[in-house]
Image: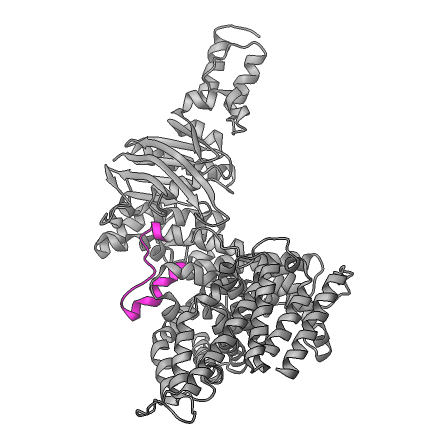
Amino acid sequence: MPIEVNSVSYVYAKGTPFETSALRNVSLTVENGEFVGIMGHTGCGKSTLIQLIDGLMRPTEGKILLDGEDINSKGYDRYKLRRKLGIVFQYPEYQLFETTVERDVAFGLKHLGLSKAEVTDRARWALETVGFDFGKVRGLSPMGLSGGEKRRAAIAGVLAVKPEVLIFDEPVAGLDPLGRDALMELTYDLNAAGTTIIMVSHNADALAEYAGRIIVLENGELIEDGAARQILSDVRKLREKQLGISQPTLIAEMMRERGVDIGHDVIRYNELISRVVLLVNGGVQK
Amino acid sequence: MATMTTVKKSIITAVCIALCVVLPMAFHAIPNAGSVYCPMHIPVLLCGLICGPQYGLLCGLAGPALSTLFTGMPPVAYLPPMMIEIAVYGTLCGLMMKVVHTKNLYADLYVSLIIAMLGGRIVGGLAKALIFAGGEYSMATWATGYFVTSLPGIIVHLVLIPSIVVALMRAMLIPERYPKVDS
Amino acid sequence: MSRLPTGTFIPGSSPVHRLDARVKLLSLIALLIAIVSVDTLIGYAVIAAITVFVIGLSGLTLKTAVGSAYRMYLFFILVLLMNTCFFSAEDPWFSFWLIHPSHGGMVQGLIVVFRVFMVLVLSNILTCTTQPMEMTNALESLMSPLRFVKIPTDQIAIIISVAIQFIPTLFEEADMIRKAQTARGATFDSPKLSEKAAAVMPLAIPIFLGAFKRADELSLAMEARGYTGVRIHTNRKKACLRFGDYAAMVSVLAVCILLTAFL
């Protein structure tokens, strides 16, 4: 189910004095089952890119292909796109609108042609996946939930469609550490079950733990596209581009500076810990 | 919170005025949005219902004016009659909500909305007649033109606006009109 | 739709841009009165000449200045037709049912079109050369005498300035909501009347919830800082009128009075 972005450019307000180029000649491919992280500064074009991939905007140049089909071509079945791709925007809790949580989650299922029983099952599955007790929460008004609960309900609404690809835009923004971990664990589980995950994030820790591949955008151009380990461990480059660096990477760098041979490719907590244990047990001091 | 402070009402009015500019743009993608949904009416009606007549009046005057200023819609020529009509909506909504207390939220809202929309169209129609053809406007043309084309809009508003009010109350952003005595 | 139109204001540094907004507003009103009172051909020519002069002075292109007025061409054609056919004048060309087109009617139609066109162009020039905040301040300043009739002009001015500042924020939020719901398969419209309201709710309700939430937060913050809506004497620096402003004001008034009185 590969997504192909072919030489895509996007210009805002073309032809007016306020014309700005958001993306310039970006090309990339996402294969089935990948976990891709997208990093970059505010304004680098990350949000524009994912909105183009999800068909919410048309590129000024270039093509977006899903399974080999141009999603912006005449006659392309938009509902197919909506079934296959799910997108969770930043602060998704703002999109809740229905009278009950169950109705809101079921909203995205309207165009799937499911039976009433199937819709309820999906809603139950989605709400339970994000950690709710279906029986308790289904009849509540979404407006009365807490902030964190609202976000989980909104995510359930996107999950209910069971898309093959899930795109997240800053999913952990505004969440406390427990909430962050819970959400990242959820994305990991979904990825393990076969869902392709594309995640835009500033949070290097989250991406380091879970992403297999990292894409870096700067000023609308794609400047890095490679294995997460390779990109996220290159501390010098990350500093140069003023991108986030994960805690384990920083700790490893500090250890290297003090002469500890911790290796140059540590980016995750468990790796860091096991290396340290190895070193201590191996008796290598200092 | 039983009633809102002046500050809260003022800022809600400000937000509704801003929405008079933003909503038509947001609805732009929907075909025929302007004639059926009349997106500019919605914030003004809400402002009048929630804050009161003087705020509804201000919203109805400033909303369309700012919209013309920022987006060019409605075109300047149509602005004066529109301002009058929409200002009447806001004012009447507020007045009716002050006067009508049926102990049922929906009943209050329906009565206020219907009277406001009828009143606004009557006054707006008169204003248009004076401006457009200096008295040559026949009653028949006006009546058919106005009511028939805006009937769908009236129905949509009658369903949509109470839903918005209820959602706002559930989210505790505005006080309940008839708070339940037993929690 | 993903980019907020910044309104009709076009940045610049022409003499017209730099005039005090109050002068521009009053000049516009004076010119409006002149346009409606004048009824000789020379008078119209003078008004057209003044308009062209102001356009030139403002640095706007003819296309921009006339733009929104030009887009009303259907309206103008309609008015022209209606006046030609229905205006009661002597000596119609022919008579058919209610329609009696005449030369007098056509002239009347042209006059109406000319007047409306001029009004639109002049208002357009005003909005193109004045920032919304400047206009709000000018309006507040000019309306301050209304305070004596118990109209809270300062409260109104604050409400309008807050509204203006909210427009970009609410616009972006509305855009995001529209995109998020579209991504969930929403179409916001339905051929059946009974479903039209329900179809637009995924867009309308979140927009209002978000907007009112911001209103809630802002009003709380303002109250926490001691703002109660009661007028407190502020020492806001009022922009002084400069020589250029006075000169412009006087010349416009003079021209308008002459026009109204003699033409």
Q: Which stretch did the figure color magenta?
A: C182-203
Residue in the image at 31% along x and 43% along y: A85
Residue C130 visible = no
Is A215 within the magenta?
A: no
Give coordinates of residue A14: x percent, y percent: 43, 47
Give me the residue at 31% from left, 53% from top. C185
Quick one: which residue is furthest to the front in this view?
Answer: C42
Residue B181 x %, y %: 52, 71
- Judge by depth and name the residue closer to the eye, B126 or B96: B126
Question: What percent of the width, then of the height, locates residue B21?
Answer: 50, 63
Q: How is the image coloured?
A: one colour
Check residue C199 for magenta coloring: yes
Q: Is residue C178 left or right of residue B183?
A: left
Is A48 drawn above or below residue C6 in the view shown?
A: above
Q: Quadrant of the N terminus of chain B?
A: bottom right
Q: Nearer the viewer, residue B117 or A99?
A: B117
Q: Tell me where residue A164 sits by quadrant.
A: top left
Query: Is C162 situated above or below C263?
Result: above
